[in-house]
Image (spheres, rainbow, N blue to C red):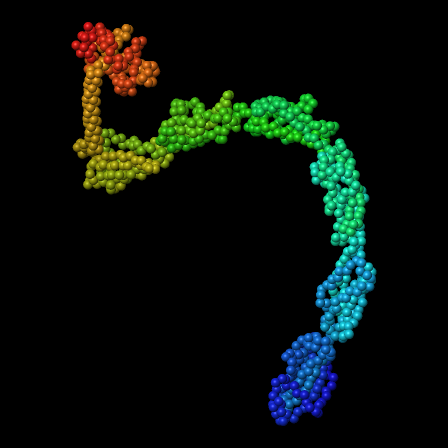
Amino acid sequence: MAYGITPYSGSIKWRFGCGQNWKLLFFVIYLIRMVSGHIRYSIPEEMKKGSLIGNVAQDLGLDLRRLRSGRARIVTGESIQYTELKTDKGILVVKERIDREQLCGDVTPCSFTFDVILENPVELHQVTVEITDINDHSPTFKRNSINFEISEIANTGARFPLTSAEDPDVGVNGLREYVLTENGNFVLKQNSNADGKKYAEMVLQKPLDRETNPNLSLKLIAVDGGTPQRSGTVNIDITVLDVNDNAPVFNQSVYKAAVMENSPRDTYVTTVNASDADFGSNSIVTYYLSDISNSLSDLFTVDDKSGVIIITGSVDYEKDKKYELRFDAKDQGGLTDSSKVIIDVIDVNDNSPTISVMSFTSPVSEDSPSGTTIGMINVKDLDSGDNGQVNCRIEQNSPFKVKSNLKNYYTLVTDTALDRETVSEYNITVVATDAGMPPLSTKRIFHLKVSDVNDNAPGFSQTIYNGFVVENNSPGVSLLTVRAQDPDENQNARISYILEDANIGGSPVSGYVSINAETGVIHAMRSFDYEQIKQLVFVVKARDGGSLPLSSNVTVKILIQDQNDNPPQVLYPVQIGGSLVAEIVPRSADVGYLVTKVVAVDVDSGQNAWLSYKLQKATDRALFEVGLQNGEIRTIRQVTDKDAVKQRLTVIVEDNGQPSRSATVVVNVAVADSFPEVLSEFTDFTHDKDYNDNLTFYLVLALAVVSFLFITCLVVIISVKIYRWRQSRILYHSNLPVIPYYPPRYSDTLGTGTLQHVYNYEVCRTTDSRKSDCKFGRAGSQNVLIMDPSSTGTMQRIQSEKNILDEPDSPLEVRCNTQSLYLFKHCFSEKKCISQLVIGYSLTENKCPWFVSAPQCGQLLF
């Protein structure tokens, strides 16, 4: 808004900005004629950008064309240009935000001045813009809170200065007054400084009491005079300092408590509590016993800080049933209070029952009947009355119970039948409980084992066992394993497996299979042939080792699987060695003429018996063919006169096994129209070359075998001759003849007068050659002594093909029927022994023995 225009005729104020050259100014003044004017506007602060300040063209009396032609513009010496001239409209608008507090601070009034310059001719007009204040700031305090610590004995009228608030606004928008929230202790007093600034003080109007209100929270509010009104707040926190003006006070005048007799040390009794309204050290209370005798000081004590009373001695109901104690509470200032504590002692059930074992039997047989006594116990309780009444029971569910027969005596018996396979041992917990409150109990655990009886038969896991084996198996191969379980233990659970007697194909099952009695492994006893037997069905018995053994049976089925172990057998045409069989084909036969059919069978089964026929060799392959499946031999072309009369076909028959087996058959075919023609052609046939080759092989093999046997016999004879010669030489040089002794009941059954008899001897050997005792062996049916006078005189002992003279250090006892003949080498050196042998022989045979020379014989006889 324009307030007026004031022209100047005197000196003109030019504002071109700092640094303008004065020479340039003088030059401009010299050249042009100058005109100037001055206008003033007043606007509030914080106007928006583009807001209208005033119409400069209208207020200066300038035409809009003059503003444009004169290139009107604003010249200011400030760094920030707050206004802008719109030359097209001739108006002045706000260009930047204008903050009065930032521009002028506390200075009033607040304004800024700038010049409007036009050219051709030059005109200079001064414009002043006054900025008026608006209430855009609230009073603020520099601190968020004001803290005071005031003693509760502070005097009334005491002053406490408060922090002043700041308001950047001026005039009516500035700070007007302070307001203190309502309270019962303080009032607010406001004052002004010499510069006009206001401040406030808080004055104590009513004495403080920390015990009533230890902390005060007030608010100081600073209010300005603007519209709308703005305010600022600061918290005033007042802490009331304590003084010791209150004595401790117990919350009860009499405390009552009860304790159990025999309570352990440090058992809690009760807690006494005294409170002091003061604060800090003035409120600290200590507790102690007053007027206490020595006996009570040994039983109870109180914690001086917490007031907790505990037991420090032994409390016995039988001695004292009640205790009375007096306690004092004192604060740090010496102020005190007293209270009384009454403690009642409660009788308790403080003796537990005791269990004594009179007898106990373990283990017990699982077949023991119900009611079997397994133990006897004695239960006592030292308490009296209800506390001494005892009830005895089994703690857990078990097949046992406790019976009371006499006072304080109980028997432990079985309640139901026992089963070791279900539970093999028990931990029987017997609980004795008295009738006290609370009841006391004692437990005694009895470890009972249940002994086993053979009451369970072995059980197989399967009702039938199936096994498979391929034919032509090796004897002894494992077929399968049967398993049986017996829930019994030890010997009663030891299972033996047995084959039940049965016949398979007329033979006992043991000839086919065997079973391991311990492991249950079934082995094959022979090699099976599928063509003879297809399966084995037998029964295996599992028997335990109990004194009365129990058993169970299971059926075992062994399926024998076929193997391609049989070659095809040709049934037709029949192959007869040395003879020829020929099929006749007329020369007029057409294509497909059936010559013959090869018939073969295979004793195997399945695909191993599927046969196929192939033509292996043929005199003329272009003339015949063989059906692959049926073995039919047919012509595949027309027979001509050029075809040979004698046709030889070799047909191979193969099965479908893996690996396949085959058989070969030779078919002779005669291509002729008459039998004489065939006969003449086949007269010159000789035996097959294969037959001749086989015969030669067998002849050579027989010759080799005969030669080997001849050489072997020759070597054996020579060896025997040499051996006998060496034995005779040894006997002759060592004077150790072997002379048979004939028993009295001996008779010559041959009647030839020659000595040819067999003697059975029983041989015994001493355990030590240096001792005379003999250790007798088995009856000597295996020990044979043969004397043959027609031979060169040898003695041969047949026992594992060892000669009796091969053991010179072992004395022998030879017994023939009831007579014994001792043959020791050192005995033969005595003439008496030899003389008896020679005389006996000479009397029987009427001649000297062959092993003594004539001079020696005469010397011994005479």
> Which quadrant of the figure has residue 593?
top left
**Can residue 91 be seen?**
no
Q: Quadrant of residue 826?
A: top left
Q: Position of residue 164 (x, y in %)?
A: 75, 68
Please tell me which residue lies in front, 638 or 613.
Answer: 613
Corner quadrant of residue 187: bottom right
Frontmost residue, 545 versus 64: 545
Residue at 58% x, 24% y is 362
Q: How many marks?
A: 0
Residue at the extreme front: 294
Q: Is residue 89 above or below residue 599?
A: below
At x 72%, y 32%, the residue is 349
Q: Nearer the viewer, residue 193 or 702?
A: 193
Q: Is residue 846 above or below residue 528?
A: above
Nearest to the observer: residue 710 or residue 311: 311
Q: Position of residue 63 (x, y in %)?
A: 67, 88
Residue at image location 72% in from the left, 63% down from the top: 145
Q: Does residue 523 appear anywhere in the picture?
A: yes
Q: Position of residue 581 (x, y in %)?
A: 23, 31
Q: Residue at x 36, y 30 (%)?
A: 474
375 to 736, vertically: above or below: below
Task: Name the quarter where the C terminus is drawn.
Answer: top left
Q: Is residue 859 left or right of residue 150?
A: left
Residue 697, position in %: x, y? Answer: 21, 30
Image quadrant containing the N terminus: bottom right
